[in-house]
């Protein structure tokens, strides 16, 4: 935990993941796993590492995460609660050109003809940091998002893959 508190998120992730993997029956395993998740998110979004995560779970706000990527992904999140889950790749989905994502009106996860893999989680009010991480041997890079969740709203997160600047790379 000292590594995490010192902002050494890569070292904390490695140390705590190894601890959790090799101590399946330890009472601190769940906490170590959550801190390792938060450390991985903080590698991409340093603000996510400001506070040590707790073992709290759940909340009252529905957040649906959809996958508009051909890659299977792991979704990591941290904030008032910390956790992770996986989503299968979207059959029929392809990577977007980076240029297309810069256009006004870019709206992934919005093709009514596609059935996006999705999962709904409940989170508490507050700021939650998300990391969408491709699984396996994908060449895609992880993407992040920060959501300030408020009561009375439904939220949707959309994971998608980009490629080059429209040059097919």
Image (cartoon, rainbow, N blue to C red):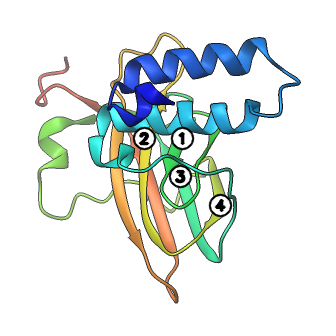
Left-right relation of 87 to 26: left
State how far apart marks 1 and 4 are (Cα). 12 Å
Q: In the rendered structure, find residue 120 and report the number of the disc placed on it.
A: 4
Question: How far separated are the C-alphas under marks 4 and 2?
Answer: 16 Å
Query: Which badge, 3 or 2, is on the more N-terminal residue?
Result: 3
Task: Quadrant for residue 62, please give it.
Answer: bottom right
Counting from the top left corner in percent of width and height, residue 10 is at 39, 20
Whole-angstrom CA distance, mark 3 to mark 2, is 13 Å
Position of residue 112 relative to residue 118, above or below, is below
Instruction: Identify the residue under disc 3.
Output: 66
- Is 164 drawn above or below residue 74 in the view shown? above
Are discs 1 and 2 less than 8 Å apart at CB? yes
The numbered mark, 1 or 2, whose residue comes first in the sequence reads 1
**N-term-proximal mark, 3 vs 4:** 3
The residue wearing badge 2 is 131
How far across and how far down the image is residue 14, in percent? 51, 15
Q: Residue at x 64, y 31 (%)?
A: 32
Which residue is labeled 1 in the image? 75
The percent coordinates of residue 156 (x first, y second) are 48, 65
Classify mark 3: helix, strand or loop. strand
Q: Earlier in the sequence, mark 3 or mark 1?
A: 3
| Figure quadrant of residue 30 | top right
* 91 lies left or right of 105: right
Of the 4 image quadrants, the one containing the C terminus is top left
Residue depicted at x 53% and y 52%: 66
Q: For residue 95, say whether it is visible.
A: no
Picture coordinates of residue 6, whole percent (x, y): 34, 31
Q: In this rendering, is residue 75 above or below 29?
A: below
Q: Residue at x 48, y 10 (%)?
A: 137
- Which numbered disc, 4 or 2, marks the residue closer to the eye? 2
131 to 167, vertically: above or below:
below
Residue ID at (36%, 15%): 139
């Amino acid at each position: 935990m000292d590594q995490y508190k010192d902002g050494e998120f890569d070292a904390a992730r490695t140390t705590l993941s190894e601890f959790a993997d090799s101590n399946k029956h330890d009472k601190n395993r769940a906490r170590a796993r959550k801190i390792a998740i938060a450390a991985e998110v903080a590698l991409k979004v340093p603000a996510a590492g400001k506070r040590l995560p707790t073992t709290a779970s759940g909340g009252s706000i529905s957040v649906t995460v959809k996958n508009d990527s051909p890659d299977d992904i792991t979704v990591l999140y941290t904030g008032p609660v910390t956790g992770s889950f996986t989503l299968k790749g979207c059959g029929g989905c392809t990577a977007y050109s980076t240029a297309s994502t810069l256009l006004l009106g870019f709206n992934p996860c919005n093709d009514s003809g596609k059935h996006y893999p999705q999962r709904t989680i409940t989170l508490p009010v507050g700021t939650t940091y998300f990391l969408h991480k491709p699984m396996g041997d994908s060449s895609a890079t992880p993407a992040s998002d920060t959501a300030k969740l408020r009561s009375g709203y439904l939220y949707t997160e959309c994971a998608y893959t980009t490629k080059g600047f429209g040059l097919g790379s």
